[in-house]
Image (cartoon, rainbow, N blue to C red):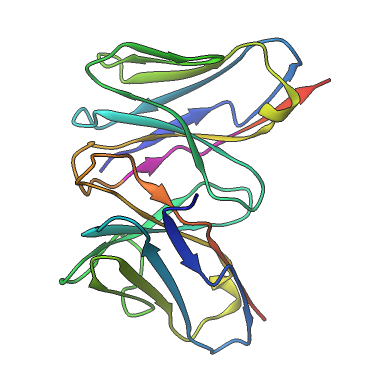
Amino acid sequence: GAVVSQHPSRVICKSGTSVKIECRSLDFQATTMFWYRQFPKQSLMLMATSNEGSKATYEQGVEKDKFLINHASLTLSTLTVTSAHPEDSSFYICSAEDSVRNQPQHFGDGTRLSIL
Amino acid sequence: GENVEQHPSTLSVQEGDSAVIKCTYSDSASNYFPWYKQELGKRPQLIIDIRSNVGEKKDQRIAVTLNKTAKHFSLHITETQPEDSAVYFCAASKGSSASKIIFGSGTRLSIRP
């Protein structure tokens, strides 16, 4: 079963809306989670590394004021796409690593965001 | 930072034949190389991985080889089946806790019946 839960799975909203996506580790604690974006027929591009209790680390070219990340607990990271526009429409996927059990990163099911 | 290149971008093979996908990486500090299979609209699924202290790893019809000197690694699928049709991604990571994974560009594999 899924060990990383991502919600919602699908969002359709109007331009200018802010959208929050949640990523939860279900049976392990994750001090670090990762957020990826995947455009159609392209690869997963790392957007940022979410660190529990501290600021996220953003990849080059990713606007931190546009994509707000909060990692307030060891099992939850949220990504908020602020004032979303059609070009933000994409598949957003989170992942988390169970560092205690030294297992590979587990991916969430992804969120398909469509901005009209 | 790390850069992972993958080819081919598309690959079509006859059912029962073998498929090979190749990747190169740039950061010599990378030491963990996972391979993912992604079906349309789904999350990537880890199918096999290899660490830099190993040159080859096999799991049934799937094998991965690593040449750390040349910074090359490859995925081999033997006796391909229709259900192997998907997009495959190679990736590289430094492998320590909280290390980010950098993905290749992907290979769309189609198995012809």
Percent across and percent down for residue A25 are: 35, 60
Of A78 and A1, the residue lying toward us: A1
Name the residue: 30% across, 15% down. Answer: B70
Percent across and percent down for residue A113 are: 58, 71
Q: Is residue A31 left or right of residue B91?
A: left
A11 above or below B72?
below
Location of residue B24 (image quadrant): top left
Q: Is residue B80 left or right of residue B14?
A: left
Location of residue B67 (image quadrant): top left
Q: Can you name the residue that lies furthest to the left here?
A: A54
Q: Can you name the residue that lies furthest to the right here?
A: B113
Percent across and percent down for residue A114 are: 63, 73
Percent across and percent down for residue B105 are: 51, 39
Of A57 and A102, the residue lying toward us: A102
B84 above or below A70?
above
If the image is split into quadrants, where does the C terminus of chain B sit?
Answer: top right
Name the residue: 36% across, 73% down. Answer: A78
Magenta residues (range): B101-107
Q: Is residue B29 left or right of residue A48?
A: left
If the image is split into quadrants, where does the N terminus of chain B sit?
Answer: top left
Of A99 and B51, the residue lying toward us: A99
Name the residue: 29% across, 47% down. Answer: B100
Q: Is residue B52 left or right of residue A6?
A: left
